[in-house]
Amino acid sequence: MTEQHTVERPRFGNRSSPAGEPHVEIQGLSKTFTGRADPVVRGLDLSIPRGEMFGLLGPSGCGKSTTLNLLGGFLEPSAGTIAIDGAVVNDVPPYRRGVALVFQNYALFPHLTAAENVAFGPRIRRMPKPATREKVAGLLELVGLAGHADAYPGQLSGGQQQRVAIARALAVDPALILLDEPLSNLDARLRADMRVELKRILREAGVTTVLVTHDQSEAFAVCDRVGLMFSGDLVTVGSPERLYRLPVSRQAAEFIGEGTFLPATVEHVGPGTTIKARVTLPDRAIHTDATTTVPGIRPGQEGQVFIRPEYVRSATGDATVSTTVEDVSYLGETVTYRLDARGQQIWYKTLGTGQAHQVGDTLSVTWSGSDAVFLPEEPSVRAGGSSPQESRAS
């Protein structure tokens, strides 16, 4: 009878605090580079629970990669503190922080096999050979590469190389793993597949993760919560659904997706986060309920009502807006219509069961007040680990 040998999956990081407890605490973190007047990162406050997969999302130059390098110890803060497991690590070098970084270009050793790349960290730390072999086997199984242990990086696809890089990072039992644009070098189809794999691997590993990306789909598919950064400020933190459905500003709404902005004036502020607004269209005004994510909204305040295109629907009656179809984009799974309401543009999206309307068609549309968001003209929103909109939702 052949003896069955089961490879034991590795365990990661310092488990001094239970799952859900604060693992990373950032307070007042700022970074200003010599020769620059404005900080690249400005007064950032953030709390990340143990085991969470957290994403930093924003355009190029917003400060997200600088934040990642500050977390990893590759840059020194100009102000503020970073604590991991309750200990401030501002002066702790990278190799003593228990942090592993997965590079954008994978940075695998081309002359080492997949197994040898994964074993590099444990060998540097003088782990016994039997334990190293066991750990490497478990990690290659975890990332789905058990049959590619002897392959060199040049013999592996981009997605396979990325998984080797993740396994190598996990091999040092990091308390925290940092991912810098981890899927940017892959083609579109492989990126979509790797999002699923990346989430599975990191979820199964149970290690606290910070992922930096400019790709909304990547952040939303992989992360439990996402922080949105603009010009060095962390402007909002929340679940992917909340960031999409309830943006805190026009800039946030446009970065995360498309939608319709209609000029509006607040008529009544209701309980909680609800308001009633008067939407001004070129030919008439309509009244709508809406939600707001910005505190301090008052009657008479001007701004815009924002509606995602999938929340617009065709309808008839007094509360509808009459439009003309200006453009149709058939994308297979969806059909997007650009509508004109006498000079006011409205976006309308349906499932791609077929193109129901043609350019030039007249179409009356409406929306639900629960799907409309009021955004004031000049929002002043700053958020950290418990943002205003997040706090009201909890």
Image: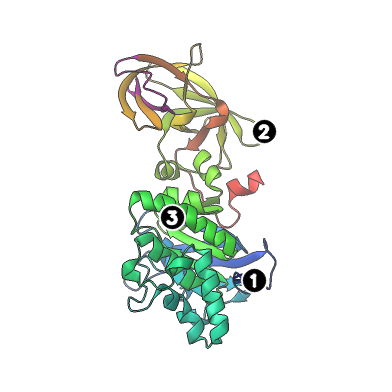
- In the rendered image, which residue does mark 1 sit on? 1
| 342 is within the stretch colored magenta | yes
**Residue 132 in view of the camera:** yes
Of the residues under marks 2 and 3, which one precedes in the sequence?
A: 3
- In the rendered image, which residue does mark 2 sit on? 271
Label 1 packing within 10 angstroms: few (<14), some (14-19), many (20+) = few
- Residue 169, given in percent of the width and then of the height, sits at 48, 72
- In the rendered image, which residue does mark 3 sit on? 194
Of the residues under marks 2 and 1, which one precedes in the sequence?
A: 1
Residue 393 vertical placement versus 351 (above, below)? below
Quadrant of the image occupied by residue 362: top left
| 234 is within the stretch colored magenta | no
Judge from the rendering whether residue 144 lies leftward or rightward of residue 326; answer left or right.
right
Q: For the residue labelled by badge 2, is the local secondary structure a helix, a strand or a loop?
A: loop
Q: Are marks 1 and 3 in contact (CB under 8 Å)?
A: no
Q: Foreground: 125 or 214?
A: 125
Residue 279 vertical placement versus 194 (above, below)? above
Q: For the residue labelled by badge 3, is the local secondary structure a helix, a strand or a loop?
A: helix
Three-letter code, disc 3: Met
Which portion, as a residue range, is magenta? Answer: 339-361
Label 2 packing within 10 angstroms: few (<14), some (14-19), many (20+) = few
> In which quadrant of the rendered image does the N terminus lie?
bottom right
- For marks 2 and 1, give the one nearer the viewer: 1
x 53%, y 64%: residue: 142
- For marks 1 and 3, give the one nearer the viewer: 1
Three-letter code, disc 1: Met
- Residue 29, given in percent of the width and then of the height, sits at 51, 67
Question: Which label belongs to residue 263?
Answer: none
Three-letter code, disc 2: Pro
